[in-house]
Image (cartoon, rainbow, N blue to C red):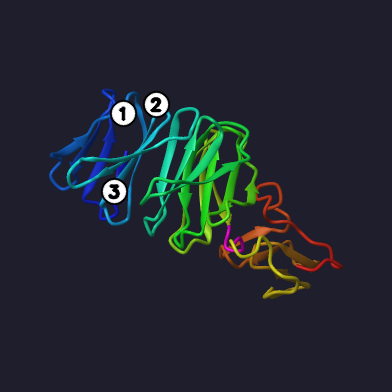
Amino acid sequence: MAFSADGRLLATANDDDSVRFWDTATGREQGGLSGHRGRVRSIAFDQAGALVATGCDDRTVRLWDRATGAHVRTLTGHADRVYAVAFQPSGTRLATGSSDGTARLWDAGTGAELRVLSGHGARIWTAAFNPVGDLVATAGADHTVRIWDVATGRGLHTLTGHTDQVWSVAFSPDGRILATASSDGTVRMWNVGGISAAATAPEPGLRAILLGLPDGWAALAEDGRYKVEGDPAGRFWYVIGRCRFEVGELDPYLPAIRRLGEEEVF
């Protein structure tokens, strides 16, 4: 199911291979879509509410005119069921994820396939764009989350730590935090503010935050890497999350965060 951006409509997929729209204020049905030959696995509204995308067991993605219910175009290319569809905030691009282990980027206006994102070792369950629309995150049955450059299709970062399939990903409104939910029973928050399409890592010495501690100091880079010198009384403030962690506590849980030696640069 999926809500429209304004929250007024809810779209649901049904066992009869159709999609139905519901008025969230009244609970009344507001029309529907039909045309897939197989169960609809994923639904997404564009930001303007003009287009709806659906992914299906028939290996296709279809775009629909929300106002009229008319089928606009069919996107073909996936070799297996399509479990994820997501519009770029601008509405110009569409990301899809499939049981074939690939994610794909499409031109929402023409239906042209722009990029094939390969790297996951198994089916992809979910995809989401960041608020700017220059990054897309995908996750699935291989227990990993991958972040991609939308313009080039280049893989920028792989987040590991979940021990089972990852079913959902979502960016915070400012794009700095990515939340992921898994069958391992955990929801994890990842600092992705340092990941950008322009650069996969901060430049050496670029804008580190220095913190004075009772018996030492800590330095934190924008992407979450840190150094600790001396005995900081067993704890320090992790500024981006505004939470207190024991020194080293984050290491096994957030692989994107790693402690650096004194001689290493950020």
**Residue furthest to the right:** 263
Q: CA distance from mark 1 to mark 2?
A: 7 Å
Say what amino acid the circle numbered 3 marks. Leu
Q: CA distance from mark 3 to mark 1?
A: 16 Å
Q: Earlier in the sequence, mark 2 or mark 3?
A: 3
The percent position of residue 94, horizontal first and vertical second, equals 42, 48
Q: Is residue 149 above or below residue 185?
A: below
Residue closer to the observer: 89 or 183: 89
Local secondary structure at mark 3: strand
193 within the magenta span: yes
Q: Residues within 10 Å of mark 3 (few under 14, many from 20)?
A: many
Q: Residues within 10 Å of mark 2 (few under 14, many from 20)?
A: some
Say what amino acid the circle numbered 1 marks. His
Magenta highlight range: 192-196
The answer to whether mark 1 and mark 2 are in CB contact below 8 A is yes
Q: Residues within 10 Å of mark 1 (few under 14, many from 20)?
A: many
Circle 1 sits on which residue?
Answer: 36
Say what amino acid the circle numbered 2 marks. Asp
The residue under the point 34% across, 26% down is 39
Question: Is residue 125 left or right of 62 when viewed as pictured?
Answer: right
Number of numbered discs: 3
The percent position of residue 203, horizontal first and vertical second, equals 71, 70
Local secondary structure at mark 1: loop
Q: Earlier in the sequence, mark 1 or mark 2?
A: 1
Q: Is residue 186 visible?
A: no
Q: Is residue 20 visible?
A: yes
Circle 2 sits on which residue?
Answer: 58
Q: Is residue 238 above or below residue 116?
A: below
The residue under the point 32% across, 38% down is 1
